[in-house]
Image (cartoon, coloured by chain):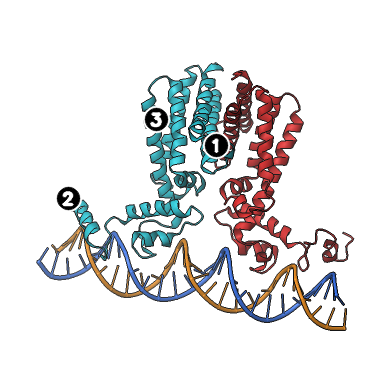
Chain colours: A cyan, B red, C orange, D blue
DNA sequence: CCCCGATCTAGACAATGTCAGGATTTTATC
DNA sequence: GATAAAATCCTGACATTGTCTAGATCGGGG
């Protein structure tokens, strides 16, 4: 049946007072992200999200089992964007495995800084896996698989499992910590530097790490 | 305890003693930490904290301006413990500046794993500085001063400000990210390894970074 | 001794998440 | 096509939360 998509579009434009919204699920996710950006995770409210979407306070229940489930779905969406950002960064880098790893790391940090609320939600909200046991959330797994592959490429075929694990821990820990400190405003020690130099400092820290990975030859 | 009553013994202190309860301020902080450990930051409730402390739901208002202020005070307490843990680790390490830096990093991660709820609160709750503008919270500053000093020692006297900043960003980012990933359960890739090897992997990642800091000679 | 301030309790208010039941629209079946 | 079933949304209610206001209780300084 070709009907569904057409119908929803017409609903969306015409019926402001309509009973059926059309695509409430997507609208709720968008509204939740906007609410999150304005009020933060602590000040998040399901009812406010419903208001922003133009529906009653109980409407979300038909699309998400709970407020946490809505946020979990948003987190999954965030992971998908993160994967896309890292993939783009890797593709743009092209060159050596080390360059790809550094690019992925910079992409990770850039994503966090561009979407701080999403980043916080992804790593601080309740874990999506717990809330969607048989659901979709493979995005985190895909993000990790990318990281592992790139690290393994840098280390070469001779690396042991423990060596790879250590490199992953260091690489992920570094970019994750940098991202978190930056978006949380904890990196006040970068304040005295002009913005351009700040960026360079962060980027250099990542590049140097990537360089140090291969150099040690383990 | 020899005291006839808990109330009278408080009097001599800072004038901010307990009258009815004994020392409600401290009791509330302890109760809040216990609540945090049980229910997490999301499930935290000021009323439940008051119940646990055995007082009415409005009693905390006389010691903390708001629920956030209570949590901020707890966060400050957490920073003090973090400083103590890092100082102890540094003192125990003794040796070279590089060894001290690695020890401080391991202490940072160990603290986070021992007090995950506190760690989350410290870096995820509302920022303490905002809530206590003219107050006490110098603990975060002290923790950072320690880090900076140790990093500067490793780099030597010839290091520029930008070089120090980059090293601080990398060092702090690495241990902070490691700590966060570990307590959040995101480091599932360490699952296949036995616990002892897991510890070794994390410790090695920190040690190798510390070693790479001085080696580059910048 | 008595009053005053510090400390705590009790009650109330708006706001929140969730559940139950009714209204309305869409879809599937005859 | 009409009609029953399903999906979608609304209104109302409940318990719980943080915070405010007012009253009670205790201790120490006048």
Q: Say which label, 3 or 2, has the lower sequence index.
A: 2
Residue B48 lies, in percent from the top left, at 62, 63
Residue A56 placement, left or right of D15: left
The picture quadrant where one finds residue A153 is top left
SS label for mark 2: loop
Q: Establish if A141 lies above or below A67.
A: above
Task: Inspect this view and state whether residue A168 appears.
Answer: yes
- Gap between marks 3 and 2 measured at Cα: 37 Å
> In the depicted view, which residue is nearer to us: B119 or A34?
A34
Q: Residue at x 55, y 23 (%)?
A: A163
Q: Say which label, 3 or 1, has the lower sequence index.
A: 3
Q: Say which label, 1 or 2, has the lower sequence index.
A: 2
Judging by the rendered image, the residue that carries numbered circle 3 is A89
SS label for mark 1: helix
Q: Residue at x 53, y 25 (%)?
A: A209
Q: Quadrant of the C terminus of chain A?
A: top right
Residue A28 lies, in percent from the top left, at 36, 55
SS label for mark 3: helix
Residue B113 placement, left or right of A22: right
Tag in front: 1 or 2: 1
Q: Looking at the image, how many numbered discs can be counted on the residues?
A: 3
Task: Inspect this view and state whether residue B106 appears.
Answer: no
Judging by the rendered image, the residue that carries numbered circle 1 is A177
> In the depicted view, which residue is nearer to us: A52 or B142?
B142
Q: Are marks 1 and 2 on the same chain?
A: yes
| Disc 1 residue crowd, few under 14, some 14–19, many 20+, Cα 10 Å | many
- Gap between marks 1 and 2 measured at Cα: 48 Å
Judging by the rendered image, the residue that carries numbered circle 2 is A2
Residue B167 lies, in percent from the top left, at 59, 28
- Gap between marks 3 and 1 measured at Cα: 19 Å
């Amino acid at each position: 049946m070709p009907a569904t998509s057409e119908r929803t579009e017409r609903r969306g434009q015409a019926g402001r007072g309509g009973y059926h919204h059309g695509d409430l699920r997507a609208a709720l996710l968008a509204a939740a992200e906007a609410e999150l950006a304005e009020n933060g995770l602590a000040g998040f409210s399901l009812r406010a999200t419903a208001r922003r979407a133009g529906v009653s306070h109980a409407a979300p229940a038909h699309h998400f089992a709970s407020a946490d489930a809505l946020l979990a779905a948003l987190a999954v969406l965030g992971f998908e964007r993160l994967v896309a950002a890292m993939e783009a960064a890797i593709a743009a880098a092209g060159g050596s495995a080390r360059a790809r790893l550094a690019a992925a790391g910079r992409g990770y940090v850039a994503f966090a800084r561009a979407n701080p609320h999403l980043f916080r939600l992804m790593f601080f909200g309740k874990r999506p896996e717990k809330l969607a046991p048989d659901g979709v959330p493979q995005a985190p797994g895909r993000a990790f698989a990318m990281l592992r592959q790139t690290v393994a490429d840098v280390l070469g075929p001779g690396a042991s499992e423990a060596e790879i694990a250590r490199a992953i821990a260091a690489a992920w820990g570094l970019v994750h910590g940098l991202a978190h400190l930056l978006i949380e405003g904890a990196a006040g020690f970068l304040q005295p530097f002009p913005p351009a130099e700040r960026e360079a400092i962060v980027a250099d820290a990542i590049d140097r790490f990537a360089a140090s990975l291969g150099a040690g030859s383990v």
